[in-house]
């Protein structure tokens, strides 16, 4: 009686503003005690407070059982509290076992509503239906669906509409119930009460959103409601439903134009007005006749929609303005040129771009693509670029995306000046906060330079500005810091590809003055500046750090730039020293380019990324092959000598790196090529015809790798990594770098590591592992001696210098066996245990046991439900399945109502399962049980005989049974003569006569004789029972004596 009420709780929370959490925790502790009370009033009061706390974020799932108890209260006020607590407390009904306890309770409430027709039971059913719609599960829906359908025929519209609305929630969990009950739902469209019809329309409209095709047969009924109903809220649903049916039945579109136009002209309800206009926009794509002509009222309907939507957009209400923009978006999808003839609408939409509401700005931004022409594209993009500077967050990214879409739509049909578009892309690449759109900007940058030939040189110039105008020595940069100009890192690979692929256009790009192509003060020219910017170990292109993908692109295109520099230097020398101003590449610049590459490629060769490491290593070896020393600046070579080597290899580098500019291929051509299938096989001779061998002049001479005829010298191992050659001893000394311009063989590559004795590239090296030989060959790095290391396996020596082939003759097999024996003697044989597949141990038995254990564990996990705890990582524990709304909608959309019901589609019945009786098998009773049974029988017989004797004494049968002398039967007397018993008579026994009168009995002679027989039989049983007792006592005494003797 002193519990706090809900008002006290709310007042206390307001008063305890500083320690609200402490106050609530104290009240929750009190509520837990109140919930355990047997009094319904106390429980309901506690649940009221818990319901309020649940709205503040506290859980009340632990009180679900108490809510079910209060739900069963006979008082409606308490019952309503319990149902409300169940709705809020059972937030996950699929995972709560308490929901199973509500099945019979809800069934009782639903069936009780039909008793009496109306009254209090009707409202009890109402709160039960409300609770069911919130806690329904698949099992609850299956069990209670017949009861809900039965309530659709209830005399009260209150119950009918509640049951109808609850069916939608049941169908989400139990989709099969829709097929079983759809016929009864259709009948509700003809109900006499308008509220029930409105509920039926709501349910069918929501169901049609998942699969409109199922509800095409209802189109006539809804069209009738559209033309006859005056309920605006129901008309909104009807218009929505008919609009969703138009794509499924296009003939419905022309029939709906007139009724919807009448609604637009007559109604004053803004919500209905918008839905009608939106439905008209959905109908417009399907109103064409079979001959291709439009209906006669088509222009009138278009103008009506435009005027209505313009009024929405010009309204000061933000909600109506947003709806107007959405309507314009739907209208422009089918009529994209409507705004071209309505200039006032274009002004309103452009005005919305400056609205304070970001949602309105985003909607207006999506309409610009329908307003753009070749004339106003530049003006619109210029205004949008100003918006980009002032915008922030996601809206700035939307602006960038819209600019790219407007310019690139329909293969750049609106762009007249691609140089201007390239400037726009450069501006977008420098905007901060739009890094998510960097990939789209990079694709456009490359696509324009790739497809538009006249703008390539300008694209090279703008890409060059990204690299050389942002370094430590760039103009406007102080203290060696990065420039304030920002560039999205995702754009850098595109700019590097343009500069490298079209590097032959660099002189043309630098013809116009106004650009200082220097990376820093040590830059010797544009080629050197670009190579410095791309291969700088830190702060490459002014960005630090760079992604591995960007580094790989930089290394590749830096080599393209070096090839272009060599070619340009050769052209300068061919002009016999005539100055070509910015078009020339001097020997000093070429020398600086070679020095920068040889220095920086060593660092990139040690990259953890495989792609970067491979490209840097390949580029480094290519430079070594043309005769460049590993350390250009350390040697006393002149710039002229380095330049002469580069000029000699110019044709080869150009042929390998940039044979010809890449050309674009249209998507249609790619599809056509794919449809043709793979190309026909080409012979080796045909491939060789395409190779320009003049680009490799040194191949005509004898080299360590090729002979004069161009055949491979030595073994195939130099280009094959799957076979190994016998170890050969190379010459001692530092050598290995051919400064005369010859191609260095792989044997020489192996002999340069540390200046120690090494094997050929095919065999393993004693001075370092194979990977170190590939990654650090000819690099200025120190290597340590690996000879004698027991963990370093090199290829064993074979008696012949030929390639060991296992498929060859017997000599080859013998050589392979000798090589294997030599390796085994040196390092010891290494064998892999094949006893089991497990890598955890060596024993096959253990692995089998572990497999069996895992299999048992997995089998046990299949039948267990796991609950995730805070201590578990959650990696190996299967997560419980959680039903989501989207999945329920998906299952509901799969229901097909167009096919008739089959034999299996039967309404579920509530029948109890009867367990069949099992036959009772006779059990063998043990000896002790037999003894106990015998004792119980003897005691029972004693009691019955004593009772008979007492009754005989009371009725005066002693003298009759034992003779007139009145003698008694002794203990030793065992025989009694039956013939000596005289029959009693009523005159001889006055007591017997008195009892006969009292009980209303008359003792006949036959009855007297039968009673005498019973008495004689019991008398005969007395001495036998006594004899049995005496025997049992004797046996017990004997057993006790024997046990005492044994113990003694």
Image (tube, grey):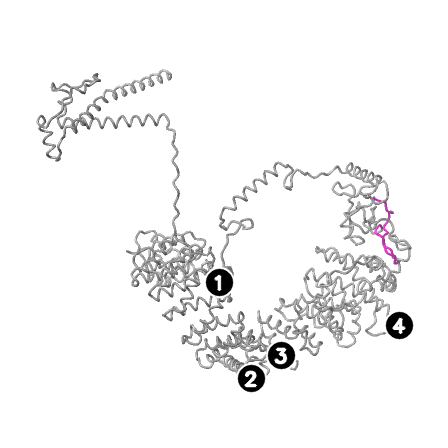
Disc 3 marks which residue?
372
**Among the two numbered marks 4 and 3 on one chain, the one whose residue lies closer to the N terminus:** 3
Whether tag 4 and tag 3 are in contact, CB under 8 A, the answer is no
**Among the two numbered marks 3 and 2 on one chain, the one whose residue lies closer to the N terminus:** 2
Nearer the observer, 124 or 552: 124
Please state if 1046 lies on the left or on the right of 1018 as rendered: right
Disc 2 marks which residue?
344
What kind of secondary structure does the magenta stretch mostly adopt? loop
x and y, in percent, of residue 771 in the image: 76, 50
Disc 4 marks which residue?
575
Whether tag 1 and tag 3 are in contact, CB under 8 A, the answer is no
Residue 19 visible from this viewpoint: no
Q: Is residue 571 magenta?
A: no
**Among the two numbered marks 2 and 1 on one chain, the one whose residue lies closer to the N terminus:** 2
CA gap between label 4 and label 3 equals: 51 Å
Q: Secondary structure at mark 4?
A: loop
Q: Residues within 10 Å of mark 1 (few under 14, many from 20)?
A: some
Residue 227 visible from this viewpoint: yes
In this view, the mark in front (2 or 4):
2
Disc 1 marks which residue?
897
CA gap between label 2 and label 1 equals: 48 Å
Q: Secondary structure at mark 3?
A: loop
């Amino acid at each position: 009686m002193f519990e706090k009420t809900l008002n006290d709780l709310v007042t206390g929370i307001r008063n305890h503003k500083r320690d609200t959490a402490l106050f609530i925790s104290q009240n929750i502790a009190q509520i837990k005690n109140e919930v355990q009370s047997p009094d319904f009033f106390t429980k309901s009061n506690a649940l009221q407070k818990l319901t309020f706390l649940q709205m503040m974020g506290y859980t009340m799932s632990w009180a679900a059982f108490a809510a079910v108890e209060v739900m069963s209260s006979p008082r409606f006020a308490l019952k309503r509290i319990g149902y409300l607590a169940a709705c809020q407390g059972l937030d996950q009904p699929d995972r709560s076992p308490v929901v199973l306890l509500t099945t019979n309770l809800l069934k009782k409430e639903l069936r009780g509503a039909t008793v009496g027709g109306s009254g209090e039971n009707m409202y009890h059913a109402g709160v039960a239906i409300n609770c069911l719609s919130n806690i329904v599960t698949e099992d609850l829906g299956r069990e209670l669906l017949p009861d809900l359908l039965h309530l659709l025929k209830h005399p009260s519209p209150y119950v009918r509409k509640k049951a109808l609305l609850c069916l939608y929630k049941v169908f989400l969990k139990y989709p099969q119930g829709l097929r079983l009950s759809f016929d009864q739902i259709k009948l509700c469209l003809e109900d006499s009460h308008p509220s029930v019809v409105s509920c039926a329309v709501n349910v069918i409209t929501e169901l049609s959103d998942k699969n409109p095709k199922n509800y095409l047969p209802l189109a006539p009924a809804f069209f009738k409601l559209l033309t006859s109903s005056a309920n605006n809220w129901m008309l909104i649903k009807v218009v929505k439903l008919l609009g969703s049916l138009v794509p499924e039945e296009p003939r419905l579109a022309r029939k709906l134009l007139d009724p919807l136009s009448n609604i637009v002209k007559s109604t004053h309800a803004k919500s209905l007005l918008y839905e009608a206009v939106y439905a008209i926009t959905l109908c417009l794509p399907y109103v064409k006749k079979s001959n291709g002509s439009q209906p006669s009222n088509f222009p009138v309907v278009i103008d009506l929609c435009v005027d209505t939507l313009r009024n929405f957009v010009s309204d000061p209400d933000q909600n109506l303005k947003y709806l107007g923009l959405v309507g314009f978006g739907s209208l422009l999808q089918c009529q994209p040129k409507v705004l071209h003839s309505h200039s006032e609408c274009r002004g309103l939409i452009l005005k919305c771009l400056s609205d304070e509401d970001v949602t309105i700005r985003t909607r207006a931004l999506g309409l610009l693509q329908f307003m753009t022409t070749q004339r106003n594209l530049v003006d619109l993009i210029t205004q949008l670029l100003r918006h980009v500077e002032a915008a922030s967050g996601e809206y700035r990214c939307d602006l960038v995306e819209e600019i790219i879409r407007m310019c690139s739509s329909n293969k750049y049909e609106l762009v007249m000046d691609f140089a201007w578009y390239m400037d726009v892309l450069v501006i977008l690449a420098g905007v901060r906060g739009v890094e998510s759109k960097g990939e789209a900007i990079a694709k456009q940058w490359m696509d324009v330079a790739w497809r538009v030939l006249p703008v390539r040189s300008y694209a090279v110039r703008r890409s060059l500005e990204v690299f050389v105008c942002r370094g430590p020595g760039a103009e406007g940069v102080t203290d060696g810091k990065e420039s304030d100009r920002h560039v999205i890192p995702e754009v850098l690979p595109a700019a590097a590809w343009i500069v490298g692929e079209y590097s032959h256009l660099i002189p043309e790009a630098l013809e116009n003055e106004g650009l200082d192509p220097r990376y820093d003060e040590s830059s010797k020219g544009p080629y050197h500046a670009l190579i410095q910017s791309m291969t700088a170990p830190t702060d490459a292109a002014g960005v630090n750090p760079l992604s591995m993908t960007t580094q790989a692109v930089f290394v590749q295109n830096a080599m393209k730039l070096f090839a272009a520099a060599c070619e340009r230097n050769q052209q300068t020398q061919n002009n016999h020293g005539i100055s070509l101003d910015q078009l020339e590449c001097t020997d000093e610049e070429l020398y600086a380019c070679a020095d920068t590459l040889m220095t920086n490629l060593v660092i990139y060769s040690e990259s953890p990324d495989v792609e970067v490491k491979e490209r840097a290593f390949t580029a480094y070896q290519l430079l070594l092959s043309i005769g460049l020393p590993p350390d250009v600046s350390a040697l006393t070579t002149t710039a002229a000598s380095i330049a002469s080597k580069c000029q000699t290899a110019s044709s080869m580098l150009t042929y390998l790196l940039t044979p010809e500019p890449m050309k674009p291929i249209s998507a249609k051509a790619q599809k056509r090529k794919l449809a043709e299938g793979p190309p026909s096989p080409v012979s080796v001779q045909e491939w060789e015809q395409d190779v320009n061998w003049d680009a490799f002049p040194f191949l005509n001479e004898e080299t360590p790798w090729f002979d004069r005829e161009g055949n491979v010298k030595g073994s195939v191992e130099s280009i094959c990594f799957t076979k190994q050659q016998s170890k050969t001893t190379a010459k001692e000394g530092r050598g290995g770098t051919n400064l005369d311009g010859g191609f260095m063989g792989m044997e020489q590559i192996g002999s340069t590591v540390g200046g120690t004795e090494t094997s050929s590239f095919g065999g393993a090296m004693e001075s370092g592992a194979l990977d170190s030989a590939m990654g650090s060959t000819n690099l200025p790095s120190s290597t340590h001696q690996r000879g004698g290391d027991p963990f370093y396996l090199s290829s064993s020596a074979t008696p012949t210098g030929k390639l060991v082939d296992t498929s060859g003759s017997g000599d080859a097999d013998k050589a392979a066996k000798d090589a294997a024996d030599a390796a085994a003697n040196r390092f010891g044989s290494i064998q892999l245990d094949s006893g089991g597949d497990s890598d955890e141990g060596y024993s096959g038995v253990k692995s089998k046991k572990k497999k069996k254990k895992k299999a048992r564990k997995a089998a046990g996990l299949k039948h267990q439900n796991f609950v995730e705890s805070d201590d578990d990582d959650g990696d190996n524990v299967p997560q419980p399945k959680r039903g989501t709304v989207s999945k329920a909608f998906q299952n509901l959309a799969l229901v097909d109502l167009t096919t008739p019901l089959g034999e299996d589609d039967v309404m579920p019945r509530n029948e109890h399962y009867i367990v069949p009786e099992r036959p009772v098998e006779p059990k063998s009773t043990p000896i002790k049980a037999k003894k106990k049974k015998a004792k119980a029988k003897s005691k029972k017989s004693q009691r019955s005989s004593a009772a008979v004797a007492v009754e005989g004494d009371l009725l005066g049968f002693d003298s009759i049974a034992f003779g007139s002398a009145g003698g008694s039967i002794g203990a030793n007397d065992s025989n009694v003569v039956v013939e000596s018993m005289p029959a009693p008579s009523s005159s001889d026994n006055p007591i017997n006569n008195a009892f006969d009168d009292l009980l209303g009995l008359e003792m006949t002679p036959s009855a007297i004789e039968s009673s005498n027989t019973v008495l004689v039989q019991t008398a005969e049983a007395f001495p036998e029972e006594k004899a049995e007792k005496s025997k049992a006592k004797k046996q017990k005494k004997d057993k006790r004596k024997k046990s005492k003797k044994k113990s003694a």
